[in-house]
Image (cartoon, rainbow, N blue to C red):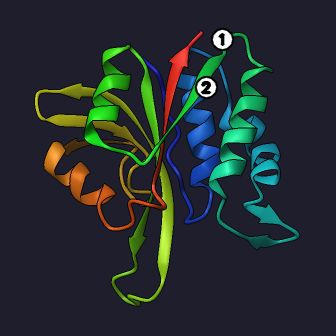
Amino acid sequence: MTRYVKQRDSVNCGPVLITNILKWAGNQYSWTEHKHDLMQKCGTYNNGLKFGCAQSRVQDVLEYETKRVKKGVKVIARGTPKLALIDKALRKDGTAAISYYRINKKNPEYVTGHYFLCIGQTHNFYETVNLFWNRSTITMLSRKRMSKILRPYPKHNYLWEIQKV
């Protein structure tokens, strides 16, 4: 069984996503060993200041890192995430890497983004990795809830289909 990484802060979801994709592909990829390098490449840690990670940067870093490991992945950009695209990726024995944006409940004008991985599906539930950075590593999410998460900012949300090579 794959031991996925849980995000322990509010900014490193991009580097954690990359680590979990490489672990999903079957690599012995250590978060402890690679986290500082990934944070630097993704731009989430810069001279003591922390920032979020842009979608284009996550894709570039993932494509770079996959060339350095034994078991690589193929990254297919799919655009706006839809349940049908997630289902398609999972049916092909792949996974879906998703970025989405949400409104901060305490300050509605503050919009934050997050990356997570969808690794499986059972009945009407998706198995996700690092969906909520301050909770468990693996979360089962209903189709209805997944649809609700992806709805607020569809033009900014993004999905990558990931296949093992």
The residue furthest left is 123
Is 138 on the left-hand or right-hand side of 67?
left
Density class for disc 2 (Cα within 10 Å; few <14, some 14-19, many ≥20) is many
Name the residue beneath numbered marker 2. Answer: 22
Q: Which residue is mark 1?
A: 71
Observer-nearest residue: 79 or 16? 79
Pinpoint residue 51: horizontal percent, then vertical percent. 70, 69
Which residue reaches farthest right? 47
Q: Quadrant of the N terminus?
A: top left
Picture coordinates of residue 135 (x, y %)? 37, 56
Report the front residue among 31 and 46: 46
Q: Are marks 2 and 1 in contact (CB under 8 Å)?
A: yes
Question: Whole-percent x and y of residue 134?
Answer: 42, 60
Indicate which disc residue 44 carries: none
Toward the viewer: 146 or 37?
A: 146
Who's the residue at 32% across and 67% down the image? Answer: 152
- Residue at the spot x=19%, y=53% of the render? 145
Expressed as whole percent of the image width and height from the top left, the position of residue 155 reads: 44, 61
In percent of the image, x 24 and y 27: which residue is there? Answer: 121
